[in-house]
Image (cartoon, rainbow, N blue to C red):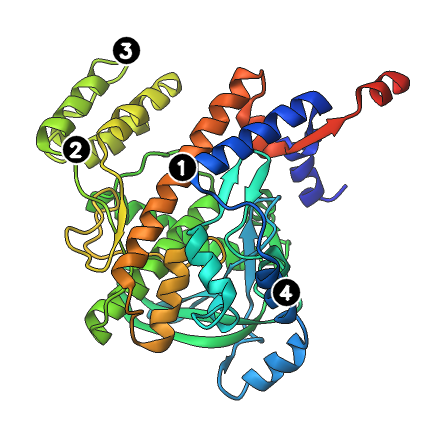
């Protein structure tokens, strides 16, 4: 058994799906239908949208060949994706190089707006849906999977259209020396799962070992730097593979919105996160300080985000959830706005927006269009409100569905990690 296969076998996905009866399967289906109706979440795609998506998957190779004249050809650049084992579409890929006085980090994002633009029925449907809704064991997509999981997905060993964010980073501070955003053609060398990426970091002889090692070195420094700057890190125990993806995507998202704001002077769909009031923060810190075995370092009380970070690092594992919950309770909702006013409090970024997930978030799709057109949709404010509202609906749907799973005796995390299989009771008895 290879190391990669071994890494997978020891994880939740190696345990097989959670088995349930047909009756319980019907209960879950009814609950989902009830939630979708209540929160106006669309299930099936209209036939016209599916037909349009299907048509855009034809003649892809020739179309990409035609696009090469207009785009930067990055197919020779070592590139790979890292995603959960059950990911169905891969919308971001990485490349990295170390040079004498800088790092060059490329974040390649699926060029969804090449296929889905305001002239299409798929665009209107995406606006209607607002985002992909992820429930344990069940997904309601924003874009038709027939398109998202094929031509938009950065699968290995196939030419794909991408929107690349090329960042030249100063070696000392990892600040942006230059940011370049352009349309490209890439070819991913490999699709890694998170556990495979961890394996590659361990094994000096494995393919992509050096690249993962280098990108982790840079991502880890970016992570530490964010914490020092006062970015809130509620999950201190992230593994290395998740750290790589999280930090590189944050860096790319930030680069795109900086470029739009400062260099181009066009509006974008910004992610704005207001801060809690001083009283709310002090209430949260007091609640944390009162927990058994937990102590907030005295030097950090002046900056609540740094206080929480420092406390989480030394707190007993049994108290982590309570600390996170104390913070989440006082946090206002983040929302999408056409003005970055106030910035993103939790991340401590003055300007921030989403760009790296156009297959599953309307905000990213809109920002791709703005970067490409260098202009904003006339109804940008309306689109910001739409994206914010639908995200709220998706979160409520997920919360209520998880609660229901617990009520019927299922572990939402196990269902999420392993999926569900409906087993015929009579058949099951026969095989016993």
N-term mark: 3 or 2? 3
Q: Secondary structure at mark 2?
A: helix
Question: Mark 2 sits on what residue?
Answer: 304
Is residue 276 rendered to the left or right of residue 220?
left
Which mark's residue is nearer the viewer, 3 or 1? 1
Marks 4/3: CA–CA distance: 59 Å
Front residue of 105 and 35: 35
Question: Mark 3 sits on what residue?
Answer: 292
Marks 2/4: CA–CA distance: 52 Å
N-term mark: 4 or 3? 4
Q: Is residue 113 above or below residue 311?
A: below
Which mark's residue is nearer the viewer, 1 or 4? 4
Which mark's residue is nearer the viewer, 2 or 1? 1
Question: Mark 1 sits on what residue?
Answer: 395
Front residue of 81 and 369: 369
Q: Residue at left 51%, top 40%?
A: 134
Is residue 338 rendered to the left or right of residue 156?
left
């Amino acid at each position: 058994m290879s190391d990669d296969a071994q890494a997978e076998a020891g994880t939740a996905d190696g345990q097989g799906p959670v088995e349930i009866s047909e009756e319980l399967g019907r209960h879950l289906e009814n609950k989902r239908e009830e939630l979708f109706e209540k929160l106006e979440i669309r299930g099936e795609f209209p036939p016209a949208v599916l037909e349009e998506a299907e048509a855009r998957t034809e003649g892809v190779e020739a179309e990409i060949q035609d696009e090469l004249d207009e785009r930067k050809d990055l197919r020779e650049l070592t590139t790979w994706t890292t995603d959960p084992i059950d990911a169905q579409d891969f919308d971001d890929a990485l490349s990295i190089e170390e040079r004498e006085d800088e790092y060059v980090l490329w974040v390649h994002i699926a060029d969804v707006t090449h296929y889905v633009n305001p002239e299409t029925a798929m665009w209107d449907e995406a606006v209607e849906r607002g985002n992909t809704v992820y429930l344990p064991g069940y997904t309601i997509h924003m874009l038709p999977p027939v398109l998202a999981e094929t031509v938009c997905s950065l699968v290995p060993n196939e030419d794909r259209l991408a929107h690349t964010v090329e960042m030249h980073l100063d070696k000392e501070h990892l600040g942006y020396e230059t940011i370049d955003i352009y349309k490209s053609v890439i070819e991913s060398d490999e699709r890694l799962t998170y556990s495979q990426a961890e394996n590659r970091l361990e094994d000096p002889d494995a393919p992509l070992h050096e690249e993962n090692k280098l990108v982790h070195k840079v991502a880890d420094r970016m992570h530490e730097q964010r914490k020092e700057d006062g970015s809130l890190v509620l999950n201190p125990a992230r593994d290395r593979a998740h750290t790589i993806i999280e930090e590189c995507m944050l860096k790319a998202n930030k680069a795109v919105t900086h470029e739009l704001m400062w260099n181009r002077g066009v509006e974008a769909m910004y992610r704005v996160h207001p801060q809690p009031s001083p009283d709310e923060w002090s209430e949260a810190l007091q609640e944390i300080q009162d927990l058994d075995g937990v102590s907030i370092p005295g030097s950090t009380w002046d900056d609540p985000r740094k206080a929480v970070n420092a406390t989480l690092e030394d707190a007993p594992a049994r108290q982590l959830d309570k600390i996170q919950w104390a913070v989440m309770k006082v946090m206002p909702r983040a929302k999408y706005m056409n003005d970055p006013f106030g910035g993103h409090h939790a991340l401590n970024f003055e300007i921030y927006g989403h760009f790296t997930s156009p297959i599953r978030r309307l905000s990213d799709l809109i920002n791709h269009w703005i970067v490409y057109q260098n202009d904003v949709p006339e109804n940008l404010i309306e689109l910001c409100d739409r994206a914010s509202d639908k995200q709220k609906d998706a979160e409520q749907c997920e919360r209520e569905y998880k609660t229901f799973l617990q009520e019927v005796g299922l572990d939402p995390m196990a269902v999420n990690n392993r999926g569900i299989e409906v087993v015929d009771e009579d058949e099951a008895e026969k095989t016993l």
